[in-house]
Image: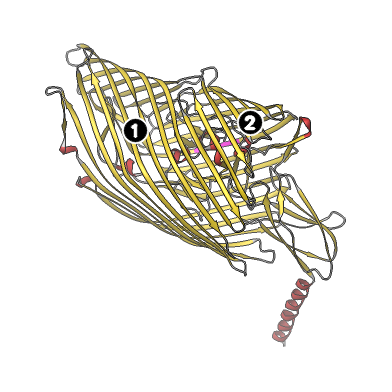
Amino acid sequence: MNRLLALLLFMCSIFATLVAQNTQTTITGRVIEEGSGTAMEAVTVSLYNADSTQVIHASSNGDGIFSLRASGTGNYSLTASSLGYNTLIHVFTIDDNKRNIILPDLWLQASNVILPAVEIVSRKQPLIYKLDRKVIEASGVISTMGGTAVDILSQTPSVKVDAEGEVSFRGSSGFKVHVNGKPASLSGGAALEQIPAGQIENIEIITTPSARYEADGIAGIINIVTRKQTIDGWSGTLNAMASSVMSRNIDFLTSYRKNNINWQTSGEVSRRYMVSDFEQVKTIDISDTLTTTNITGERKSYVDIYRLRSGIEWQPAKTLWSAAGEARYRVRHRGGALLYNDQYLSHTTNQLLSAQYSGKDFVNLHDMMYRGDIGFDHRFADDHRLTGSFFAFYEANAMEFFYTDLFDPSGRQAQGHRAWEYEYRLTAQGNLDWTKSFGSRRSGKIEAGYYFFSYTEDGDYNIDMFDPNSQRFVRHDELYNQYVFRRDIHALYSTLSNSVGKFDYQIGLRGELIHRRLDNNKEWARHVQDKFDLFPSAHIAYSLTDKSRLNAGYSRRITQPQLFYMEPYVVYVDFYTAQCGNPKIRPEYTNSLEMSYSREFGNNSVSATVFHRIRADKIERVRVPYHTGVTLDSMANVGNDYSTGVELTASFVPTKWWGIDMNGSLYRYMIRNEYKNGSDETSENWQLAINNNIDITANTRLRFEAYYVGPSVSTQGRVQSFYYFNLALRQQFFERRLSLGLNIRNVFSTAKYVSTQVGANLYSQTTILPRSPLCTLSLTYTFNNFKTQKAAEKTSHDLFEGTNR
């Protein structure tokens, strides 16, 4: 009897649920960003009844789609809001005949500021927070035209660009670079410096990536989103740049869209210089001799890029097909002419000797790359989706040439080296991803997928050394090195995400099987490693109001050692500085936790992020005495490090013609230094940027930037603080289709890089003064649908050349 009663009650509850569902109305829609035409994730969507009482609340998913349920009939209003965008209100009616309402696409506009002459110009918030990422609005910065992705990133808290142009985030350079969601052909700063700023719509910084992404890159993922075509017909942009140190650049992006076909082609021809005055003092105590060397001279580097890429997207029905091809030729050159003053003190005889030499050196790397991409995105009728992509690129005839010469005061050659490294590289990556929406509002999502990656490099190395007696270069076959390197990764992952009231959450787990093999003609350098690792992730967000949001995230990451970290042979950057890899280097592992709060009020916004990161087996370049007067740099696992701090960003509009963007960071950095017998190195790191935008007229904008970069520590030393100022002016013509920009970097010549390294029997101090002020003139022309890129000059901290010495 009790069982029968329970069964009847269960059936009644099911019937009541079905009746309730039949009397409810399902409201679905999609949120799109106006201008770019891209779906917007994490947009707050709220439904209100006729008396303005909130009925229900949800957030859009990764496809911009939201779903709500409402009981009753009558007039309703729906709001869609997101930080940095105007709130959109849509009014509609529900009656007994409407139980499944599909709303038209909701197009959100960036927050606007009314300027003189009653002209509306979009001024987006500089930094927008989403569930698992921060978005830098590239079009909101007028100081990047003629520059690269590096210059846009320099506007972000905790991003540093060192004197060699290398980018680090929260003290780490271990990040991955994606372009439109796909891995770039190069890594780190090399990938960022080849993407022209004029082709960038925004940059996404994913500091705690979910399990969906590859686990490599402890600092996270930087995703470059390029500008896209949203209307039928032709659109395009052309950018040109020239600077006072003879840098020059021409790049273009053109697109044609017709019905379900979108074709896009981009290209670049550029040479970007860095020129600095260089001074270094080295003291080395080895072989019963104390050697002090004072090195002065000019350091110059440049990067040549010749690149052409073309791609097409075709969507005949429910499947989007894509294909692209790219060819790129790249040259990286670094060198200079230096004067060496040596002093030699013998500990045995106490005799002091001196010598003077002049030297010429350079390192030249060039390679040719061919890449192909294919992909598909199929949407099924029952709310699930299958996507897949594959790319491969081949780098042919890559060659790195090392050249050093040393001459005595009479002009007679005393020493020198010639070294060649020939390489062939093949990279392939593919993934298959399945997504399923669930829940009555379809706000939940399950993702699962498979990923594979393969990298192979075949190379050999030869070195000739100068023989002073015969006055010729002699091949040293005993230093010849031949290697084949292979890394394969296979991974499975799954994530679960949903929205519950004002909460959004996502959890995930990724498993990776990693195979690493180095074959080498030196037996001691050979090794094979196979390892399986798990990488969990978790994210949660809470919408306090329509204009304020609280986010938190955690992820575990790994940084795989790059091959040049492991190359077991000595190369000479100059005669007094040698480098060698470490085949036994281990990967880094990182656990990252962060929490952020953002609030928008009117045209103003503030945001704050608190973060903590623990990194095990930190990889760092260390310097040791090699032989008389010469140091050797190599890579080592120096211990564990810890970063804990806060990042702050604010944007204010005091008047209709004046806007202020500010960002800063303060964090404590500590290295638990196993390399130096367990000693710890700590520093309080902070940096501040204040940028003023002044609209002189509707088409004329002035920007003044002030930067302070605080001191920092490494395993063996410290880098002193420095500060500098930039000034930019942009003038627009022909309804903003044509923009002319003038940028003056380091206006008052205050930037000065000073680095100190201390080790056993070693002291080294490097001082670098960039050539300044550096003037850049830029020109941008856009037509049809592409918006004018609001940019005029570089603002990154890559002012110095010669730090890697």
Circle 1 packing at 10 Å, graded few (<14), some (14-19), many (20+), is: many
Q: Main secondary structure of the magenta part?
A: strand
Q: Which residues are magenta?
A: 643-647
Is residue 358 positioned above or below 606 on the image? above
Residue type of the residue flagged with mark 2: Met
Give the percent coordinates (x, y) of residue 7.
Answer: 71, 83
Q: Residue drawn at (47%, 35%), measured in percent from left and top?
A: 167
In this picture, is 511 found above or below 761? below
Residue 299 at least partly seen: yes
- Where residue 368 appears, as percent x and y from the top left, is 36, 43
First-in-chain label (1 vs 2): 1
Q: Is residue 204 left or right of residue 171?
A: right
- Between residues 403 and 156, which one lies in front from this camera angle? 403
Residue 522 or residue 229, whichever sits in front: 229
Query: Is 316 placed left or right of 276 in the picture?
Result: right
Indicate the position of residue 532 as horizontal and vertical percent values: 39, 57
**Residue 110 in which image quadrant:** top right
Secondary structure under badge 2?
strand
Tag 1 residue: 622
Q: Give the left or right position of residue 795, taking residue 391 as reference.
A: right
Q: Is residue 143 magenta?
A: no
Q: Can you tell which mark lies on residue 540?
A: none
Q: Nearer the viewer, mark 1 or mark 2?
A: 2
**Residue 583 position (above or below residue 491):** above
Query: Which amino acid type is shown beneath numbered disc 1?
Result: Val
* Residue matched to label 2: 662
Picture residue at 59% right of the left edge, 36% below the top: 781
How many C-alpha atoms fall within 10 Å of the one at disc 2: few (<14), some, or many (≥20)? many
Q: Secondary structure at mark 1?
A: strand
Q: Quadrant of the C terminus?
A: top left
User: How far apart are the alpha carbons under marks 1 and 2?
Assistant: 35 Å
